[in-house]
Image (cartoon, helix red, strand yellow):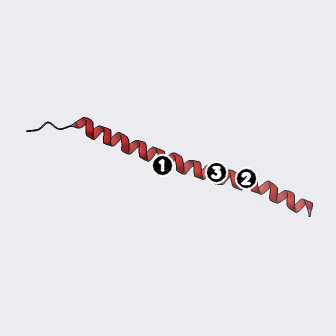
């Protein structure tokens, strides 16, 4: 009977975790970018109303 290759399974789990972690990082980065864009737009909108 062949011996089970646990190192292959372990590597597959590690790659899965890295992929998931990278997706989370990208999602957070996109969310933070959206929030900063909203913050930068708000003061410019306020200054436009003051100029009018």
Q: Is residue 39 left or right of residue 2?
A: right
Mark 3 is surrounded, within 10 Å at the Cα level, by few (under 14), some (14 to 19) or many (20 or more) other residues, namely few
Mark in the foreground, 2 or 3 = 3
Sequence-first tag of 2 and 1 = 1
Number of numbered discs: 3
- Mark number, residue 33: 3
For residue 27, above or below residue 3: below
Viewer-closest of 46 and 11? 11
Sequence-first tag of 2 and 3 = 3
CA gap between label 2 and label 3 equals: 10 Å
User: Measured from the top left, where is residue 37 in percent x and y?
Assistant: 70, 54
Seen at 43% across and 47% down, the residue is: 20
- Mark number, residue 23: 1
Residue that sits furthest to the right in the current view: 52
Residue that sits furthest to the bottom in the current view: 52
- Quarter occupied by residue 48: bottom right
Q: Secondary structure at mark 1?
A: helix
Mark in the foreground, 2 or 1 = 1
Sequence-first tag of 3 and 1 = 1
Residue that sits furthest to the left in the current view: 1
Seen at 53% across and 48% down, the residue is: 26
């Amino acid at each position: 009977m062949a011996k089970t290759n646990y190192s292959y399974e372990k590597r597959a789990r590690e790659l899965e975790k890295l992929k998931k972690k990278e997706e989370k990082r990208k999602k957070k980065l996109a969310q933070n970018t959206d929030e900063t864009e909203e913050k930068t737009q708000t003061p410019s909108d306020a200054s436009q109303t003051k100029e009018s």
